[in-house]
Image (cartoon, rainbow, N blue to C red):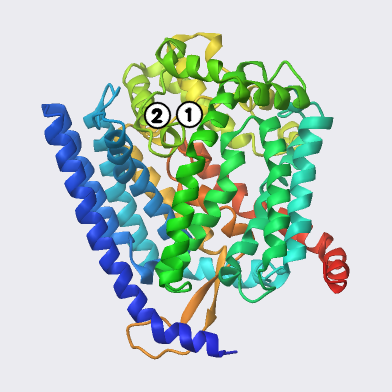
């Protein structure tokens, strides 16, 4: 049904998109000047080559993917591509420039790293174009969205109370896992523990209250919800400290910020003076809190070595004590070079947040290890990747079909760990969950044929990702405008941070080919299933609470 709000939205979308285009152009010019100035300041042959690849990748990526029409029609797939461009091309020069470092800081193969990123970008552009043009892939997307997700209520806009209820289930699952079931000592053990972990992503759902326009109609936002979200955030902070995970602490808020920016880009939110004031205020708050948040992140890193030896409550206590011990934090900052492992160095920039969101060192490490591998080592890594795929099946199925996988072994280390272990043979490499990269992993598995394999897998993954969104019709007043706006599930909104960096080594991104295959086989089913299970489980209680106007 068309509403006056929809009509007003359509009448102003054209102006908003013109502003977005103008913002894109100005931002791209400023960014390009900054990258060129940085390259001239650190004038070296290797820096110039890396700068050229960075400029080419950033400009091509922004021009192709930062379009309101693409973001409206293909919400998740376009977001994934913008995240890839941001991680490998846009953010690294900004992060290094702000710290007075060169783009190639602490990289062994900087030109090779960015060459791999550029080649993969070209293949991904080709895959994205094919995906948009092939009707069969679009049919898959809409069949899953309309015939599988929609009938079970995946796109129903939950009330604010309902979102709090579902988030509470996720909060309870984390609390039970870490405070009752044994914490890090038992986190990877048993089918029940794995089932409980499936509810963890629900914990961020209450934050969807802040961007309700993206999930359709629903409750109004007022001051009481601000207080409720503050209390909820404090509880989330405690369990996040018990998880010793920076991503768990900040990814929910980051997803909402990305969702709001997405809404601005496609015209759902007005780019008005009030919006600009809110953005400026938010930026000021982030800058103001950057110091304390960085200290908290460092505290979590400092106590990481003992997280498997103490209880969850003790881990929280130790993190808080470390945060209050400014001398210990200063010591960590000043001696970070000495603290780094001699066999694994992830340092690219000093800022702990930017070191996760724009860290070319992960790709550099994986490619350096890949280049040192012989045929037997590569064969070992291929076996590991096959086991990682087979490990998605429950143990009873593994036993029934006698699948060649040791789940207890394969799930206790990352792809980065296995690459390091394959090269060094050092048992210390396993269990550290070091971050790998799809570049080195793919090169080991398929040589220079891996960009083609990468693009082929994404060709299958794009429709599955976009099927997590729907759309609602509005009046079309301009022939250049879409006659619909995207409708996002609340589950997608609070996971937008992960989707943005899905094709990178940041946050929960894919660090190996097996990660992509795992999503194709299970991920697109598991998360919606868990969401729907809790949605209907909490539906009646939330309705009852809503009636008493709490």
Judged from the image, the secondary structure of the residue bearing numbered disc 1 is loop
Q: Name the image quarter holding residue 156.
A: bottom right
- Where residue 41 appears, as percent x and y from the top left, is 14, 32
Give me the residue at 83% from left, 71% from top: 549
Q: Nearer the viewer, residue 70 or 409?
A: 70
Q: Nearer the viewer, residue 288 or 511?
A: 288
- Marks 2/1 in contact by CB < 8 Å: the verdict is yes
Other-residue count near label 1 (Cα within 10 Å), few / some / many at <14 / 14–19 / ≥20:
many
* N-term mark: 2 or 1: 2
Q: Residue at x 55, y 56 (%)?
A: 256
**Compared to 409, does 530 lie above or below?**
below
Q: Residues within 10 Å of mark 2 (few under 14, many from 20)?
A: many
> Looking at the picture, does residue 319 appear above or below residue 335?
below
Quote the CA–CA distance across marks 2 and 1: 6 Å
Image quadrant holding the N terminus, namely: bottom right
Q: Residue tagged by mark 2?
A: 362
Residue under pointer 1: 435
Residue at 34 percent across and 74 percent down: it is 17
Residue 176 percent location from the top left of the image: 81, 37
Which residue is at a point 54% across and 53% down the rendered structure image?
A: 255
Residue 26 picture quarter? bottom left
């Amino acid at each position: 049904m068309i509403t006056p709000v929809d009509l007003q939205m359509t009448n102003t979308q054209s102006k908003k998109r013109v502003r977005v285009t103008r913002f894109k152009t100005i931002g791209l010019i400023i960014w390009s000047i900054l990258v060129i100035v940085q390259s001239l300041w650190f004038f070296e042959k290797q820096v110039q080559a890396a700068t050229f690849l960075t400029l080419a990748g950033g400009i091509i990526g922004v021009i192709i993917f930062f379009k309101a029409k693409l973001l409206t029609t293909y919400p998740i797939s376009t977001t994934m591509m913008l995240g890839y461009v941001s991680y490998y091309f846009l953010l690294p020069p900004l992060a290094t420039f702000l710290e007075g470092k060169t783009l190639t800081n602490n990289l062994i193969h900087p030109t090779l790293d960015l060459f791999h990123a550029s080649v993969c970008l070209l293949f991904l552009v080709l895959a994205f174009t094919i995906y948009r043009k092939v009707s069969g892939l679009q049919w898959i997307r809409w069949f899953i969205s309309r015939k599988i997700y929609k009938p079970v209520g995946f796109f129903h806009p939950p009330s604010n109370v309902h979102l709090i209820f579902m988030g509470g289930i996720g909060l309870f699952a984390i609390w039970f896992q870490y405070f009752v079931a044994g914490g890090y000592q038992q986190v990877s053990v048993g089918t029940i523990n794995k089932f409980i972990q499936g509810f963890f992503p629900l914990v961020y759902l209450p934050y969807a209250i802040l961007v309700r326009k993206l999930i359709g109609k629903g409750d109004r936002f007022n001051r009481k919800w601000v207080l409720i979200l503050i209390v909820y955030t404090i509880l989330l902070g405690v369990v996040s400290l018990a998880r010793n995970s920076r991503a768990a602490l900040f990814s929910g808020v980051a997803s909402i910020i990305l969702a709001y920016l997405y809404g601005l880009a496609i015209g759902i939110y007005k780019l008005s003076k009030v919006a600009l004031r809110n953005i400026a205020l938010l930026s000021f708050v982030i800058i103001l809190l950057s110091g304390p948040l960085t200290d908290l992140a460092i505290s979590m890193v400092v106590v990481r070595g003992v997280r498997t030896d103490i209880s969850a409550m003790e881990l929280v206590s130790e993190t808080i004590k470390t945060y209050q011990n400014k001398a210990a934090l200063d010591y960590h900052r000043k001696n970070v070079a000495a603290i780094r492992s001699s066999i694994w160095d992830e340092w690219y920039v000093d800022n702990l947040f930017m070191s996760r969101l724009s860290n070319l060192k992960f790709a550099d490490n994986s490619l350096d290890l890949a280049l040192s591998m012989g045929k037997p080592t590569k064969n070992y890594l291929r076996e590991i990747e096959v086991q990682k795929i087979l490990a998605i099946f429950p143990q009873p199925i593994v036993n029934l079909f006698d699948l060649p996988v040791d789940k207890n072994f394969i799930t206790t280390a990352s792809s980065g760990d296995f690459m390091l272990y394959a090269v060094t043979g050092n048992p210390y490499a396993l269990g550290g969950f070091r971050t790998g990269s799809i570049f080195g992993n793919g090169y080991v598995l398929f040589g220079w044929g891996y960009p083609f394999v990468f693009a082929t897998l994404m060709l299958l993954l794009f429709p599955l990702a976009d099927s997590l969104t729907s759309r609602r019709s509005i009046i079309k007043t301009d022939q250049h405008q879409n006659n619909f706006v995207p409708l996002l599930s609340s589950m997608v909104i609070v996971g937008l941070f992960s989707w943005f960096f899905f094709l990178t080594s940041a946050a929960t991104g894919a660090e190996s080919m097996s990660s992509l295959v795992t999503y194709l086989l299970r991920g697109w089913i598991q998360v919606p299933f868990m969401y729907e299970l809790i949605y209907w489980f909490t539906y009646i209680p939330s309705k009852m609470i809503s009636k008493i106007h709490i």
